[in-house]
Image (cartoon, helix red, strand yellow):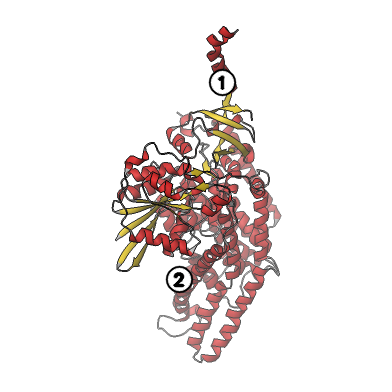
């Protein structure tokens, strides 16, 4: 088995090429540092096996951030492999340093030039065969979106036994006559997006518009959701119920399977809109513009603009955004970010919010936006509380903004939605079926009402968790806590337990939504954070988040019951606390002075 | 006068360079500058070199971020964002183009 490793500068198109060659679905995007760990895929062809490996982008064989160290160690450990050096032809003169040091390692190297079309459009020229001769290694221009190019490149790297490079040719190498760089002009869109006063308002406006499209009344998101929900929960259930006579089987299929799966699957259109917005931000390069502009805000919080990437990815999936914190240079910064990231509502929390709120609000749009906003504010607040006044470096290369390739965009969106459906059909349905079974039978395995079932005996005590806020049954508490396994479970179980609507008030529903917002992320996110900061810390974080979430839901409930009065008092206390903190900082420590240095 | 310039010309030139050199964070938006010296720690210096920011390179300061915490530079076709604290450690000579 031969290993083929993709190496190159960040944002050169390694993952895109890797996906095109192997048919994999590695995460791609138009910003620097998308890939954070090695992704491998085994490809078998004519009795031969090839292991393709995609690595995080590196600038040189001496690392700077954590993910780069990881990639460099990976290259140095392997010896029987082929290195595919992916080079963005627009930055060739800079990338050659890496190419040269790769050639000097003595491993077979092949150079793949990407982005040639755009380069030529901007007036650059390159002589590929002359470059190949000068470097002493094969050079190939590849367009990852063209099928014929990909097939041709695959044949080259699989078939030929590449010669070991001669390192002598590299000294005195120059690009003169081979390469003329393109002329980069700042487009209108770029100059607007990088404007420090325009960028953040544009982003907020876009986000608001997307939320309106998703949750607003008579908007495509809500309409599609209602349609899909009716299709699955009402029509399909009624259709299936006609054919099933035994009550137990009918209840299993209709209540246990269709209703709960339907109550989550119905959110597919809304999640699709959210995903395509995030995908657009990533692929267009707007995220980098935002990271640059918002660096001013994050510098005040003791972070740098890179945090924007983590926060925006957090709207998709918390586990993924936790992994993306590897792009930071310092471990302490990563730990702080990981503690704050779970408060960003991931896409799986969306169905729960809407399920909880839509039965009490005519139009849950504003409430949902408020919850999302509250999550962002809380995570920023945590950054503030933890900031130690240490200076963070910020060096980030900024990509050229471009319109995403439509075909590619749709393919990625389809893949992400497919994963969502697969998760619902496997994990969530299996869990709901198990719960249905436990809540429908007693210990003698006879079909009984829910209150005498196995689950009722086991989880009776859970009802005291939310007793102070007006939830007097164990089902709700159980459903909410089942979010630990996967947040989609919550909506599914609420659909299973309350087919006719909830038995509590709107204030309670809001308090429960706050609980979901603040409680610990699902098990996969905890595992991801354990990989980064260790099990002990991440389990402690999860416990802390869940306990504070319970208390925060109590506070929300009582604030809503006593209306504005308590809210005002709390706000006043909070402001006093912040002022006291700022004064304390003024007196006892200046910026960048550690507390322990002062009290000696 | 000619002999005076021949004798002290180099000193005057060096004096002028010191007089007109400033750090990168003092360069205004849209202006160009040549880098003379980079005084940051070694790892940052290496990273900057990979992004074309090295002595003798011509830099344009394109924009600044919110609260002017970072600078958007353009160096030989590479665009990068750079924290002001690092830019303060980079000595440059302003170019009047």
- Is residue A466 in view? no
Residue depicted at x 64% and y 36%:
B30
Location of the C terminus of chain A by quadrant is: top left
- Is residue A330 in view? yes
Residue carrying label 2: A427
User: Label 1: chain?
Assistant: B
Residue carrying label 1: B17
- Left or right for A448, reference A133: right
| Residue A138 pos. (x, y %) | 38, 51
Residue depicted at x 43% and y 64%:
A151
- Left or right for A242, reference A442: right
Residue depicted at x 47% and y 61%:
A522
| Residue A254 pos. (x, y %) | 53, 83
User: Label 2: chain?
Assistant: A
| Residue A367 pos. (x, y %) | 66, 61
For the residues beneath circles 2 and 1, the answer to whether they share a chain is no
Question: Label for residue A588?
Answer: none
* Residue A440 or residue A130, whichever sits in front: A130
* Residue A141 or residue A260, whichever sits in front: A141
Location of the N terminus of chain A by quadrant is: bottom left
Mark 2: give few (<14), some (14-19) or many (20+) Cα within 10 Å: some
Dot 1 falls on a residue whose secondary structure is helix
* Residue A421 or residue A156, whichever sits in front: A156
| Residue A552 pos. (x, y %) | 57, 56
Position of A152 relative to A225 (above/below): above
């Amino acid at each position: 088995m031969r290993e083929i490793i993709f190496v190159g500068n960040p944002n050169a198109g390694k993952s895109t090429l890797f996906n095109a060659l192997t048919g994999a679905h590695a995460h791609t995007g138009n910003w620097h540092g998308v890939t954070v760990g090695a992704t491998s895929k085994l490809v078998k062809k004519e009795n031969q096996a090839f292991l393709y490996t995609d690595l995080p982008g590196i600038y040189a064989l001496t690392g700077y951030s954590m993910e780069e160290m990881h990639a460099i160690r990976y290259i140095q450990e392997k010896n029987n492999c082929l290195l595919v050096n992916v080079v963005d032809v627009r930055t060739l003169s800079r990338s050659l340093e890496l190419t040269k040091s790769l050639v000097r390692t003595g491993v077979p190297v092949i150079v793949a030039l990407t982005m040639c079309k755009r380069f030529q459009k901007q007036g650059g020229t390159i002589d590929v065969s002359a470059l190949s001769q000068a470097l002493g290694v094969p050079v190939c221009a590849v367009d990852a979106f063209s099928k014929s190019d990909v097939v041709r490149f695959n044949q080259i790297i699989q078939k030929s036994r590449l010669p070991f490079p001669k390192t002598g040719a590299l000294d005195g190498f120059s690009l003169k006559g081979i390469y003329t760089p393109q002329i980069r002009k700042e487009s209108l869109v770029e100059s607007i997006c990088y404007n420090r006063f325009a960028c953040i308002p544009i982003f907020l406006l876009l986000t608001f518009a997307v939320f309106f499209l998703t949750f607003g009344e008579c908007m495509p998101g809500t309409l599609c959701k209602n349609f899909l929900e009716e299709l699955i929960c009402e029509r399909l259930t009624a259709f299936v119920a006609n054919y099933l006579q035994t009550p137990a089987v009918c209840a299993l299929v209709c209540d246990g399977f269709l209703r709960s799966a339907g109550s989550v699957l119905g959110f597919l259109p809304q999640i699709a809109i959210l995903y395509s917005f995030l995908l657009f931000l990533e692929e267009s390069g707007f995220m980098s513009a935002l990271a640059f502009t918002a660096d001013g805000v994050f510098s005040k919080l003791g972070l740098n603009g890179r945090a924007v990437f983590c926060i925006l990815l957090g709207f998709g999936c918390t586990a993924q955004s936790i992994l993306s914190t590897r792009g930071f240079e310092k471990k302490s910064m990563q730990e702080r970010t990981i503690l704050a990231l779970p408060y960003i509502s991931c896409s799986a929390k969306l169905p729960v919010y809407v399920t909880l709120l839509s039965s009490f609000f005519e139009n849950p749009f504003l409430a949902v936006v408020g919850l999302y906003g509250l999550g962002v504010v809380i995570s920023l607040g945590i950054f503030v509380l933890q900031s130690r006044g240490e200076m963070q470096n910020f060096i980030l290369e900024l990509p050229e903004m471009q319109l995403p390739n439509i075909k590619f965009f749709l393919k990625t969106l389809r893949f992400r939605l497919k994963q969502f459906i697969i998760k619902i059909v496997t994990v969530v349905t299996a869990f709901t079926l198990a719960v249905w079974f436990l809540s429908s039978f007693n210990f003698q395995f006879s079909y009984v009402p829910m209150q005498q079932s196995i689950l009722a005996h086991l989880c009776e005590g859970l009802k005291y968790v939310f007793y102070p806020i007006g939830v007097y049954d164990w089902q709700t508490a159980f459903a909410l806590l089942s979010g630990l396994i996967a947040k989609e479970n919550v909506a599914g179980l609420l659909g299973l337990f309350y087919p006719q609507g909830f038995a509590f008030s709107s204030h309670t529903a809001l308090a429960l939504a706050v609980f979901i917002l603040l409680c610990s992320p699902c098990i996969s996110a905890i595992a991801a954070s354990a990989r980064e900061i260790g099990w002990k810390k991440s389990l402690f974080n999860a416990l802390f988040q869940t306990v504070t979430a319970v208390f925060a839901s109590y506070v929300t409930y009582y604030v809503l019951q006593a209306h504005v009065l308590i809210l005002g008092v709390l706000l006043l206390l909070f402001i006093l606390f912040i002022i006291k903190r700022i004064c304390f900082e003024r007196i006892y420590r200046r910026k960048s002075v550690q507390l322990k240095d002062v009290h000696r | 006068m000619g002999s005076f310039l021949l004798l002290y010309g180099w000193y005057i030139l060096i004096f002028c360079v010191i007089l007109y050199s400033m750090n990168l964070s003092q360069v205004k938006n849209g202006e160009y500058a040549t880098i003379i010296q980079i005084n940051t720690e070694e790892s940052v210096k290496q990273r900057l070199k990979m992004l074309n920011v090295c002595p003798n390179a011509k830099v344009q300061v394109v924009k600044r971020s919110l609260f002017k915490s970072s600078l958007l530079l353009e160096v030989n076709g590479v665009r990068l964002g750079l924290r002001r604290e690092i830019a303060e450690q980079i000595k440059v000579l302003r170019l009047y183009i």
